[in-house]
């Protein structure tokens, strides 16, 4: 299996994980800033960007990983430093959470950006994204996965104070490398739809920084408040005017929060 892994800088290790449908280039500015004090490891998730999909776990229809969050976390951990701070965005944040639960010795700290322990609404989790939203994207994948990816990028910037500029950048990033195959995209949506890490959050013992966008359509503000309620030990911050990609739309505000957390909690 071939993974794309890039390292820059020197110092304590920090690993950056991107979200669904994109690749590690999403972290260009963040990585450059962090590299002044950290050794930064950038990874393209399996099937994304320059990384090959994981083979041998696909059912006949070709659903990579079968929506298996554990297998995805294990695959990423295999190419990462033995112990690091993990900074994960959206789906990447869920991967980092899972790793912190299953292998706490590998995780010195978590920075979770626009991520959730349960992305889809349920009876006891009323403020998350509606199931129909993800189901619609799953159905659209069978018709035109390129158009589906473009629609998902637009949803990530919906409501942002700098939405148009951020969306143009996201689309440029998405076009840099081959688009993930439909099986990989389908698998990621299955993880976002099915995974629920809420019952195991207490098992995460490292310092945690949660960062949300005030206008996020995928992790709404009401859900961010619910996460704060069930995870009182975590540091929590809302970036005003930001949507689902605050590190792109509000990079200075975002990095200030990350830098403060790393200096006070990690070093």
Image: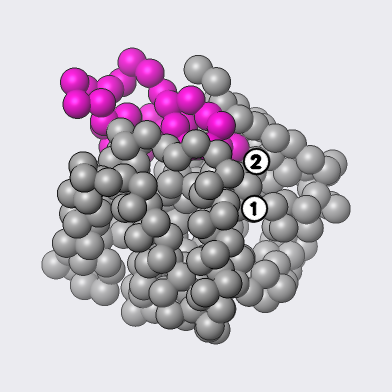
Tell me where residue 223 appears, x and y as whole percent: 34, 73
First in sequence: mark 1 vs mark 2: 1
Tell me where residue 28 appears, x and y as whole percent: 69, 52
Residue tagged 2: 42
Q: Main secondary structure of the magenta part?
A: loop
The answer to whether residue 44 is left or right of residue 216 is: right
Spatial CA distance of label 1 from label 2 is 8 Å
Tell me where residue 81 appears, x and y as whole percent: 66, 32
Asked whether the residues under the numbered discs 1 and 2 touch, taking CB atoms below 8 Å apart as contact, a structural biologist would say: yes
Residue tagged 1: 27
Q: Is residue 52 magenta?
A: yes
The residue closer to the viewer here, 68 or 135, is: 135
Under tag 2, what secondary structure? Answer: strand
Please give the range of residues in magenta.
43-72
Q: Is residue 148 magenta?
A: no
The answer to whether residue 27 is left or right of residue 73 is: right
The answer to whether residue 99 is left or right of residue 191 is: right
The residue that appears at 64% across and 32% down in the rendered structure is 5
Under tag 1, what secondary structure? Answer: helix
Res 8 → quadrant? top right
The residue that appears at 34% across and 41% down in the rendered structure is 185
Tell me where residue 201 appears, x and y as whole percent: 40, 55
Circle on res. 79: none
The residue that appears at 68% across and 39% down in the rendered structure is 41
Considering every residue shown, the one lying at the far left of the view is 123
The residue closer to the viewer here, 186 or 122, is: 186
- Can residue 40 be seen? yes
């Amino acid at each position: 299996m071939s993974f794309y892994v890039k390292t820059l800088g020197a110092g304590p290790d920090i690993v950056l994980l991107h979200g669904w449908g994109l690749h590690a280039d999403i972290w260009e500015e963040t990585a450059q800033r962090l590299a002044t004090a950290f050794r930064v490891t950038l990874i393209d998730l399996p099937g994304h960007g320059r990384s090959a999909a994981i083979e041998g776990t696909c059912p006949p229809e070709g659903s990579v990983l079968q929506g298996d969050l554990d297998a995805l976390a294990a695959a990423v951990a295999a190419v990462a430093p033995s112990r690091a701070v993990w900074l994960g965005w959206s789906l990447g944040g869920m991967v980092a959470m899972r790793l912190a639960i299953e292998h706490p010795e590998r995780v010195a700290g978590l920075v979770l950006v626009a991520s959730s322990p349960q992305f889809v609404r349920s009876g006891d989790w009323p403020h998350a994204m509606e199931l129909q939203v993800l189901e619609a994207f799953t159905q659209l994948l069978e018709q035109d996965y390129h158009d589906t990816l473009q629609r998902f990028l637009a949803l990530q910037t919906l409501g942002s104070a700098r939405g148009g500029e951020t969306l143009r950048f996201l689309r440029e990033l998405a076009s840099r490398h081959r688009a993930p195959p439909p099986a990989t995209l389908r698998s990621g949506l299955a993880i976002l739809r099915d995974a629920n890490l809420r019952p195991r959050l207490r098992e995460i013992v490292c310092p945690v920084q949660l960062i949300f966008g005030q206008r996020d359509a995928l992790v709404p503000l009401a859900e961010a408040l619910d996460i704060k309620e069930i995870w009182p030990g975590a540091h929590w911050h809302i970036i005003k005017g930001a949507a689902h990609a605050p590190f792109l739309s509000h990079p200075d505000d975002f990095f200030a929060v990350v830098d403060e957390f790393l200096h006070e909690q990690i070093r």
